[in-house]
Image: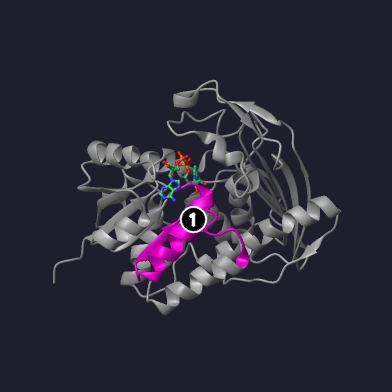
């Protein structure tokens, strides 16, 4: 029997969709992009012209009413995700959602239940649990390579979407309620440390607004002034995982440049250090301390006999979704993991404003 070619529709045709999704849909899977939708219709039309996509739509509702497709990718601005996701899942279509998929745990739970009720598979970005370097490190941790692992330190910042990225679309929405540095950047660090250690039990946080007015530095809105005084743009997040494990996530839109490593993992017999950009599929560096063998020092390990699959693009989430459907197995980018990260993000304002540590309730299965 001929293998199915999956029909994909992209909702939200901005920077990320153009940079990562449209050019890679047919490279990552047996898939073809059949539609582009955007509330700024010219963006959907422009994507169609640029990538040879047959149909443009004004929004997700018109897309659902008029187009024959299997999978939607929600790459719209953050505030729009819940409405788009509910529409897609209620129609029984499979879904990849950019982060965060919903504004709170209750609404993400509703999405998860709607997907189940309608036989739809649901995958949530970011893609860190698919990373080659992270999965090598997870295996080494599980095998005891650095002994008892107790601490992960993650730096996840840039200077702001108006600062370091060339953009055709107005980046003001990143600083409006519902968006902000925590849900746009912090989410990466939180997904990474929970992929390492599993569900966290408690969260604490300090947060500040460092730059209350910003100026767009390039692109179509170059020079535009943005009000950025409503949501913190620098977070120091501490997480307690129980069993003697903890993590620090330093994240925000307030670090124009940094030479800090994105991630280090510490154990009582060594350290795993992520010294190079993860899209290059690097092998992390490892420091080993073995008094028995008389070895103490940094090394660059070989990948091993059965290394994890390498990353090609951020569109690898499409491969995860399709493999999950075809193999009838849970996806690696599970919505339950996204919901746990969302619970942490929703607890952070109270932790920061009231200066307290907040208990967490949700869990997820942390599959290697
Ligand atoms: N590495 C990453 O994982 C990464 C990086 C950048 C952005 N993102 C995520 O990707 C998403 C989009 O970010 P971006 O940088 O492309 O922003 P963007 O502003 O460039 O694009 C967003 C697009 O969504 C459209 N849109 C808004 N509401 C809509 C709706 N209701 N229906 C259809 N389209 C709608 C806008 O018109 C715009 O074209 C966000 O969720 C963001 O957090 C992820």
Q: Is residue 289 left or right of residue 38?
A: right
Residue neighbourhood size for the residue with mark 1, other residues' Cα within 10 Å, grouped as few (<14), some (14–19), many (≥20):
many
Q: Is residue 111 above or below residue 269?
A: below
Query: Residue 17 in magenta?
Result: no
Q: Secondary structure at mark 1?
A: helix
**Could one spot residue 143 in this view of the protein?**
no
Tell me: is circle 1 under 8 Å from ligand 1. Answer: yes
Q: Which residue is the site of mark 1?
A: 81
Q: Position of residue 128 (x, y in %)?
A: 52, 53
Query: Residue 87 in magenta?
Result: yes
Q: Is residue 242 left or right of residue 143?
A: right
Q: Position of residue 314 (x, y in %)?
A: 42, 47
The magenta stretch spans which residues?
76-105
Corner quadrant of residue 364: bottom right
Q: Nearer the viewer, residue 134 or 251?
A: 251
Q: Is residue 24 above or below residue 195?
A: above
Q: Residue at x 42, y 79 (%)?
A: 117
Q: Is residue 336 above or below residue 302?
A: below
Q: Residue at x 74, y 37 (%)?
A: 209
Corner quadrant of residue 14: top left
Q: Residue at x 33, y 48 (%)?
A: 58
């Amino acid at each position: 029997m001929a293998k199915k070619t999956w029909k994909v529709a992209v909702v939200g045709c901005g920077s990320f969709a153009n940079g990562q999704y449209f050019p890679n849909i047919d490279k990552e899977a047996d898939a073809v992009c059949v539609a582009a939708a955007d509330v700024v219709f010219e963006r959907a039309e422009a994507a169609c012209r640029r990538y040879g996509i047959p149909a443009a739509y004004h929004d997700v509702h018109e897309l659902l009413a008029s187009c024959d497709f299997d999978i939607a990718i929600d790459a719209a601005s953050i505030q729009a995700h819940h409405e788009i996701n509910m529409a897609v899942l209620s129609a029984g279509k499979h879904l990849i959602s950019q982060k965060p998929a919903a504004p709170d745990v209750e609404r993400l739970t509703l999405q998860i239940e709607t997907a189940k009720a309608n036989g739809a598979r649901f995958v949530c970005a970011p893609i860190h649990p698919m990373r080659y370097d992270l999965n090598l490190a997870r295996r080494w941790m599980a095998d005891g390579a650095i002994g008892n692992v107790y601490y992960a330190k993650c730096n996840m910042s840039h200077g702001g979407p108006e600062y370091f990225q060339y953009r055709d679309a107005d980046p003001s929405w990143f600083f409006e309620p519902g968006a902000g540095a925590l849900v746009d950047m912090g989410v990466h660090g939180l997904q990474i440390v929970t992929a390492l250690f599993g569900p966290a039990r408690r969260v604490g946080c300090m947060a500040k607004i460092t730059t209350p007015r910003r100026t767009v530095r390039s692109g179509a809105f170059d020079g535009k002034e943005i009000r950025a005084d409503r949501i913190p743009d620098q977070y120091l997040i501490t997480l307690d995982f129980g069993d003697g494990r903890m993590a620090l996530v330093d994240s925000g839109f307030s670090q124009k440049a940094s030479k800090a490593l994105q991630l280090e993992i510490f154990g009582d017999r060594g350290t795993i250090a992520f010294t190079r950009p993860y899209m290059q599929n690097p092998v992390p560096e490892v420091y080993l301390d073995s008094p028995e063998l008389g070895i103490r020092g940094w090394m660059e390990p070989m990948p091993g006999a059965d290394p994890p699959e390498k990353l090609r693009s951020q569109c690898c989430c499409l491969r995860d979704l399709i493999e999950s459907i075809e193999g009838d197995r849970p996806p690696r980018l599970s919505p339950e993991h996204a919901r746990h990260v969302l619970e942490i993000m929703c607890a952070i304002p109270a932790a920061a404003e009231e200066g307290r540590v907040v208990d967490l309730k949700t869990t997820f299965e942390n599959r290697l």
